[in-house]
């Protein structure tokens, strides 16, 4: 049973998909700058959700967009288009800015081991679909024109603001919202006209004026196109609840007459040193800022997964260091288990002859139950991790006292492989040594016995060049491969 918190209902619900394949739409990055670590938290939460669905045996069809036009600096349809802000800042065109930051984002995505969506979709590739959708809304009588563009009439829509529990009628045109021809502060642009005195980098002809789409219409148009009129799950950060997602619902449900998404899921914000991230405070981090300090991406991945997605998360470098150590201890543990499998290896900590460890068997059974129960309870990763660490403690003790048998160790390793389907912080299987690598390890061993440490060290360096690290332990030599991002397997 997979339970998730549905923002729409404001409670946890048992997840029931519409069909055989779960349809999932995740609001993507506005590509006018690098993603900051708060954005990345949001995408890591969505990756966790998708992986948990897959672990539960669901098929998933996932679409994520790139907002490359129409997201204005202010949420109330005022100010500059963020893409134009980026273009002016970097003296490039908005198109060049979009291409550059899409590529940069895809690199971060890969480094953080997130599973690619089935479709990456760009707003600017779907202008035709957006215009068609606005026409449908217009035909139904929910729009009006101002000199600035086409606006959605929120006062006409019964149930507007249900996601955020807003009441459009109750909101007066406050001093903070510039109305500029809008009839209600909650009304929003579906299509904006280009300024008369200037040609924009990104503008298109439309039945109303040459211009560009309002920010929200892209997600409605692309979700409907790729996933259908009613989708299973729609996600994003909590900041999207009152405006972006509220307006996506208004547009989509007006156009189709159907419920837009059954489950709405939102991650809480990431703060840095207890404050909102901002360039002026100097606490604005990208993934590169973190990796250039020597942290592997897996440490950040683990850090985000160690905090429940609906809790605010306070990022500090100390917490990242703790996360790096936790990843290392899990890797060390998995490595220790894996050593028993190395038929060609140099050590056998646990031997066939030892009877099956009852302690490991029962600890493993409990850990499996606790892990699945936690992860399926609205993605409760902190509790799922607690179950893992408890198991690790028991198994390590059994290994230390020579009571761990190989079969139990294999069963634990198998469970960790399943866990890694969610956490993805170690390599699935240690690639066995090639005959040549094994020969080198044996040769080094014989040099050591002859006390020719210089020759032994040379071979150690040679193996390091091949990505194999040797460790001399009281139990004998251990080897491990190094992962691409520098974290040890
Ligand atoms: P944007 O590029 O602004 O559209 O944001 C991309 C995603 O990141 C959205 O789902 C936002 O809700 C989310 N987001 C933005 N800032 C933060 C933050 N500080 N913490 C967590 N999520 C965030
Ligand atoms: Zn969106």
Image (cartoon, rainbow, N blue to C red):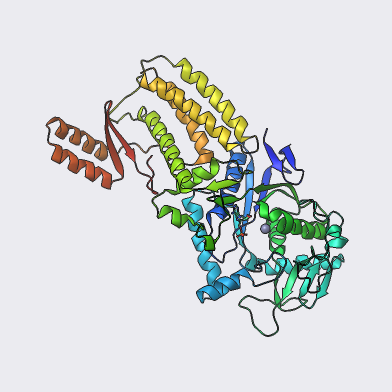
Quadrant of the image for the C terminus? top left
Residue 124 visible in the current orientation: yes
Toward the bottom, the furthest residue is 197
* Residue drawn at 24 percent across, 40 percent down: 436
Q: Quadrant of ligand 1?
A: bottom right
Side of 281 relative to 250 (left or right):
left
Q: Position of residue 411 (x, y in %)?
A: 47, 25
Q: Position of residue 438 (x, y in %)?
A: 25, 36
User: Number of marks in the image?
Assistant: 0
Q: Choose top left, top right, bottom left or bottom right for residue 441.
A: top left
Side of 230 relative to 104 (left or right):
right
* Residue drawn at 60 percent across, 73 percent down: 84
Q: Position of residue 204 (x, y in %)?
A: 68, 76
Q: Is residue 385 above or below residue 65?
A: above
Quadrant of the image for the N terminus? top right
Between 327 and 427, which is closer to the camera in this rendering? 327
* Residue drawn at 45 percent across, 25 percent down: 393
Q: Is residue 314 above or below residue 379?
A: below
């Amino acid at each position: 049973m997979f339970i998730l918190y549905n923002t729409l209902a404001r409670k946890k619900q048992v997840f029931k998909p519409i069909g055989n394949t779960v349809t999932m739409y995740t609001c993507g990055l506005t590509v006018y700058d690098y993603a900051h670590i708060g954005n990345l938290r949001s995408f890591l939460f969505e990756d966790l959700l998708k992986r948990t669905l897959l672990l539960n045996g669901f098929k998933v069809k996932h679409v994520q967009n790139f907002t490359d036009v129409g997201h204005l600096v202010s949420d109330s349809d005022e100010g500059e288009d963020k893409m134009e802000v980026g273009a002016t800042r970097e003296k490039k065109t908005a198109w060049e800015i979009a291409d550059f930051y899409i590529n940069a984002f895809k690199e971060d995505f890969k480094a953080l081991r997130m599973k690619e969506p089935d479709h990456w979709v760009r707003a600017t590739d779907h202008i035709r679909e957006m215009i068609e959708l606005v026409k449908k809304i217009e035909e139904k009588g929910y729009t009006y024109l101002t000199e600035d563009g086409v606006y959605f009439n929120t006062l006409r829509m019964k149930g507007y603001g249900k996601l955020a529990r807003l009441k459009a009628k109750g909101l007066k045109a406050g001093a903070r919202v510039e109305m500029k021809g809008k009839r209600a502060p909650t009304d929003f642009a579906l299509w904006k006209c280009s300024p008369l005195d200037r040609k924009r980098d990104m503008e298109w002809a439309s039945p109303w004026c040459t211009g560009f789409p309002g920010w929200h219409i892209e997600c409605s148009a692309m979700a409907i196109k790729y996933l259908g009129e009613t989708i299973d799950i729609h996600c994003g950060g909590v900041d999207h609840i009152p405006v972006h997602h509220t307006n996506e619902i208004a547009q989509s449900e007006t156009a189709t007459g159907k419920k837009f998404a059954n489950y709405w899921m939102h991650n809480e914000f990431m703060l840095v040193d207890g404050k909102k991230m901002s360039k002026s405070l100097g606490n604005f981090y990208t993934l590169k800022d973190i990796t250039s300090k020597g942290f592997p991406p897996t440490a950040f991945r683990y850090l985000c997964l160690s905090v429940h997605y609906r809790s605010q998360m306070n990022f500090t470098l100390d917490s990242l260091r703790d996360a790096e150590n936790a990843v290392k201890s899990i890797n060390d543990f998995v490595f220790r288990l894996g050593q028993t499998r190395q038929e060609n290896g140099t050590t056998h900590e646990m031997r066939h002859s030892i009877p099956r460890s009852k302690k490991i068997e029962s600890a493993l059974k409990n850990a499996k139950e606790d892990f699945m129960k936690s992860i399926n309870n609205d993605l409760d990763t902190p509790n799922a991790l607690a179950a893992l660490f408890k198991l690790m403690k028991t198994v390590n003790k059994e290994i230390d006292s020579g009571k761990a048998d190989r079969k139990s160790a294999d069963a634990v390793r198998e469970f960790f492989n399943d866990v890694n389907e969610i956490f993805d912080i170690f390599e699935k299987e240690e690639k066995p040594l090639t005959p040549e690598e094994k020969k080198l390890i044996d040769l080094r061993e014989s040099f050591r016995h002859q006390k020719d440490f210089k020759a032994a060290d040379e071979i150690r360096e040679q193996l390091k060049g091949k990505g194999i690290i040797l460790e001399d332990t009281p139990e004998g030599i251990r080897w491990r491969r190094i992962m691409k991002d520098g974290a040890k397997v």
